[in-house]
Amino acid sequence: MKSGTQDQAEGTFHKIKGKVKEVSGQLSDNPSLEAEGIDEKVAGKVQEKIGQVKKVLGKY
């Protein structure tokens, strides 16, 4: 299983990647790319929170 720190790092990466896709979709008037970016950004936030919880609980 992943460590809390690794989950946080990957979550941050996905948030940034999602934001880039979201803005690219807005600029290119591509709603599907924008939606994909929003989804990835939300998934990154969730993964980041999971990493924080793991660190607090000291499990991984």
Image: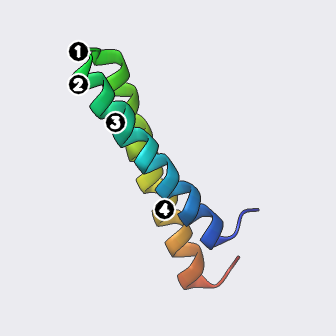
The residue sitting at 41% across, 55% down in the picture is: 45
Instruction: Please state if 21 lies on the left or on the right of 53 as rendered.
Output: left
Q: Is residue 12 above or below residue 43?
A: below
Residue 48's tag is 4
The residue sitting at 42% across, 49% down in the picture is: 15
Tell me, yes or no, whether the two marked residues, 2 and 1, touch with CB atoms within 8 Å.
Answer: yes
Q: Amino acid at mark 4?
A: Glu
Tell me, yes or no, whether the two marked residues, 1 and 3, touch with CB atoms within 8 Å.
Answer: no
Q: Amino acid at mark 3?
A: Ile
Query: Spatial distance from mark 2 to mark 1, Cα to Cα?
Result: 5 Å
Query: Spatial distance from mark 1 to mark 3, Cα to Cα?
Result: 15 Å
Disc with the residue nearer the chain's start (4 vs 3): 3
Q: Is residue 33 above or below residue 41?
A: above
Disc with the residue nearer the chain's start (4 vs 2): 2
Q: Amino acid at mark 2?
A: Gln
Residue 1's tag is none
* Residue 35 percent coordinates (x, y): 33, 26
Q: Quadrant of residue 1?
A: bottom right
The residue sitting at 39% across, 44% down in the picture is: 41
Residue 38's tag is 3
